[in-house]
Image (spheres, rainbow, N blue to C red):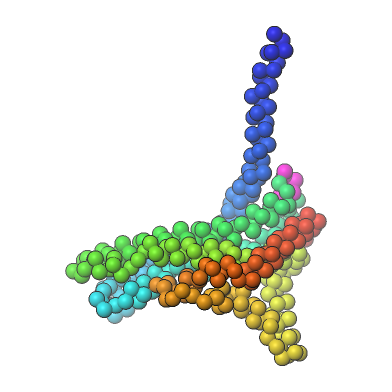
Amino acid sequence: MNTTSNTMPDSPAGSHDVAATTATPTRPFFWSLQRELWENRSLYIAPLAVVALLLFGFVLSATVGIWQRPLHIDPTQTPEKLADPYGFAALFVMGVAFIVGIFYSIDCLYGERRDRSILFWKSLPVSDLITVLSKAAIPMVLLPLFSYLLTVAVQCFMLLYSTLVVAASGQSVAMLWSKVHLFRMSSDLLYHLITVHMLWYAPIYGWLLLVSAWARRAPFLWAFLPPLGIGVFERFTFHTTHVSALLHYRLGGPESAAPVKGHEAMGSAFSIDPGVFFSAPGLWVGLVFAALCLAAAVRLRRYREPI
């Protein structure tokens, strides 16, 4: 009886321990993500402020216009022309998110050494690998997804407000909705964010995180001056532009090297052929480079001392 009574309570406790152990690898990662968002509120405040300014400008433009005229729908106007404000809003939000991601990547590992908070975070049961991966996930995953949700919300508001303005002016609302394909624009935007901002720009963020983990001072200069200096040295010494062409190839996006499938409402950058994109050697070489940079950043964080 005594043996049975001791065995029964131990079984649920043992299974609970196994479940807790299984959930351990993901819990510190998501906790680290929450910590990054809590410590760096500019990650979402800056895009939200830009969106508020963008919507304010759109409301003024749609209601009054530059020449004191309300929004007018021309029957001969092409869908591409009518969708230009929606594409501009998407590019503007993505550009702000990209800039925020660059500044975050440069400062995230350097900042914790500068303010010596790394001593506290290293005392917690979170490995350097999880910490670096959580920081890398901010510009590579969370910011693109956040910019996508913001852009879709902005475009929906723009379409609904345009509908009210068009209806109030006595024009055809059906004409507006037939020319603005919101679902296609949102799907093209999601595809663009996955291919370009998550995959194509991964080596850029990997390099910035590596510099942030290595630099003792002025990480911004260490991140940008060496590539620019090498490019200038190559140009004046060997009279070639291989480094500058490589930088343009990476920063310009895959559309600078891959053909497109025709003209889309929000530009050729949103219509890269998937077969060409995923078979491009530059994509996979860049991903390998990003993985090496992140591995080096993990090692540097493990042995770097506070500044």
> Compared to 44, does 62 lie above or below?
below
In which quarter of the view is residue 182 placed?
bottom left
Q: Is residue 118 toward the left or the right of residue 189 in the image?
A: right
Residue 2 in the image: state x and y as whole percent.
Answer: 71, 10
* 62 or 286, nearer to the observer: 286
Image quadrant for the C terminus? bottom right
In which quarter of the view is residue 151 placed?
bottom left
* Residue 121 within the magenta-colored segment of the rendering: yes
> Compared to 288, does 240 lie above or below?
below
* 110 or 6, nearer to the observer: 6
Is residue 85 visible to us here?
no
In which quarter of the view is residue 210 placed?
bottom right
- What range is drawn magenta here? 120-125
Q: Is residue 52 toward the left or the right of residue 103 in the image?
A: left
Q: Residue at x 53, y 62 (%)?
A: 194
Q: Residue at x 73, y 86 (%)?
A: 234
Image quadrant for the N terminus? top right
Residue 248 in the image: state x and y as whole percent.
Answer: 61, 79
Is residue 1 visible to us here?
yes
* Residue 39 within the magenta-colored segment of the rendering: no
Residue 211 in the image: state x and y as whole percent.
Answer: 72, 66
Residue 82 in the image: state x and y as whole percent.
Answer: 33, 74
Q: Residue at x 61, y 53 (%)?
A: 36
Q: Is residue 110 toward the left or the right of residue 53 in the image?
A: right
> Compared to 241, does 97 lie above or below?
above
Q: Residue furthest top?
A: 1
* 253 or 300, nearer to the observer: 253
Q: Is residue 90 toward the left or the right of residue 198 in the image?
A: left
Q: Residue at x 67, y 31 (%)?
A: 17
